Image (cartoon, rainbow, N blue to C red):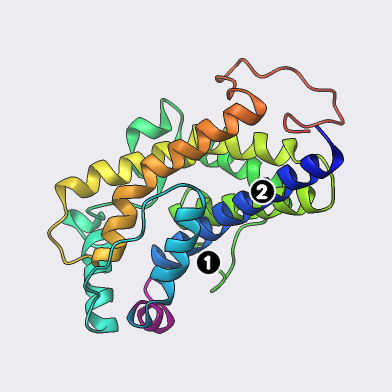
């Protein structure tokens, strides 16, 4: 492959990484607690347009046109009724992975959270405090989406600067395979039983589409850097080298 072809290939790969980053960041905004800015962006169509552009860059279908919540209050009520309120004080559709016994897979919730936090710590992230985010909830969907957005940003920056992007791709692959993709699938399955509480149609569409989209990104990453090792199969790395370097 000529230098020109190599440069073009890296540029296209960087554009795809930027599109993935955009979807992760937009999904984190849309599936976070509703704000006035979120309602306004939905009303003006800016969120839908940004999602549509990134989604189609990665080969997805155009974003459908949905009715939107008529007010911030209506957006909040649908969100609260679906993701925060429920029987005995438990959410009908939890957004934290440790709420799903099948995801913890025999670990204590504390051990599961430590495993998730290990990814964040390796890339220099710390737990949110005060109003910065979901304090002490590294397994919250929004935290996971934001982390994947960071990895995509690091990947696209490496490609733009002619550096090796494989470590960030391996980290994305492993985090998707172990944590984010299973959580998205669990949320979709849970929502299918609780889909009558007034969730905004754009949020509903995202909940329904993200699992398949995440799986497609995982398969794409495995094509680039190989399959994700199963637990216990990770190759031992030197003391000064991480599993993703």
Question: Residue 189: where, in percent of width, then height?
Answer: 24, 41
Q: Residue under circle 1?
A: 133
Residue at 71% x, 48% y is 155
Disc 1: CA contacts within 10 A as few (<14), some (14-19) or many (>=20): some
Residue 122 falls left or right of residue 37: right
Residue at 84%, 52% (x, y): give it.
161
Q: Which mark is residue 73?
A: none
Left or right of 7? Residue 45 is left
In this view, the mark in front (2 or 1): 2
Element at label 1: loop
Quarter of the image for residue 174 reads top right
- Point out the tag, 2 or 1, that comes first from the N-terminus: 2
Q: Provide residue 13's location: percent of width, then percent of height.
A: 66, 45
How far from the left and from the top, in percent, is residue 81?
A: 21, 65
Q: Identify residue for label 2.
A: 12
Q: Position of residue 128 (x, y in %)?
A: 59, 63
- Residue 229 among magenta residues: no
Q: Main secondary structure of the magenta part?
A: helix
Instruction: Give the tally of numbered discs.
Output: 2
Q: Residue furthest left?
A: 196
Q: Quadrant of residue 214?
A: top left
Direction from residue 165 to residue 41 in the image, left or right: left
Q: Which residues are magenta?
A: 33-42
Element assignment for label 2:
helix
- The quadrant of the rendering that contains the C terminus is top right
Q: Residues within 10 Å of mark 2 (few under 14, many from 20)?
A: some
Question: Which quadrant is the N terminus positioned in?
Answer: top right
Residue 234 lies, with reference to residue 133, above or below; the image says above
Q: Residue at x 42, y 33 (%)?
A: 104
Describe residue 1's horizontal placement relative to residue 66 as left or right.
right
């Amino acid at each position: 492959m000529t230098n020109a072809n190599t440069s073009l290939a890296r540029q296209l790969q960087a554009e795809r990484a930027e599109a993935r980053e955009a979807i992760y960041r937009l999904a984190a905004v849309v599936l976070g607690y509703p704000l006035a800015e979120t309602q306004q962006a939905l009303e003006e169509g800016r969120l839908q347009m940004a999602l549509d552009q990134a989604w189609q860059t990665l080969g997805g279908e155009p974003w459908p046109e949905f009715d939107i919540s008529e007010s911030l209050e209506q957006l909040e009520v649908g969100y609260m009724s679906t993701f925060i309120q429920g029987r005995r004080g438990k959410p009908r559709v939890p957004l934290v992975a440790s709420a799903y016994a099948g995801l913890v897979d025999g670990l204590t919730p504390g051990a599961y959270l430590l495993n998730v936090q290990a990814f964040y710590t390796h890339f220099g992230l710390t737990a949110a405090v005060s109003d910065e985010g979901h304090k002490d909830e590294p397994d919250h969907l929004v935290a996971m989406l934001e982390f994947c957005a960071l990895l995509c940003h690091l990947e696209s920056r490496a490609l733009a600067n002619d550096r090796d992007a494989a470590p960030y791709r391996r980290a994305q692959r492993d985090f998707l395979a172990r944590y984010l993709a299973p959580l998205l699938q669990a949320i979709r399955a849970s929502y299918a039983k609780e889909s009558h509480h007034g969730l905004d149609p754009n949020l509903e569409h995202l909940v329904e589409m993200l699992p398949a989209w995440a799986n497609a990104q995982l398969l794409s990453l495995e094509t680039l850097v190989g399959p994700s090792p199963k637990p216990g199969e990770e190759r031992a790395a030197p003391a000064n080298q991480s599993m993703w370097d």
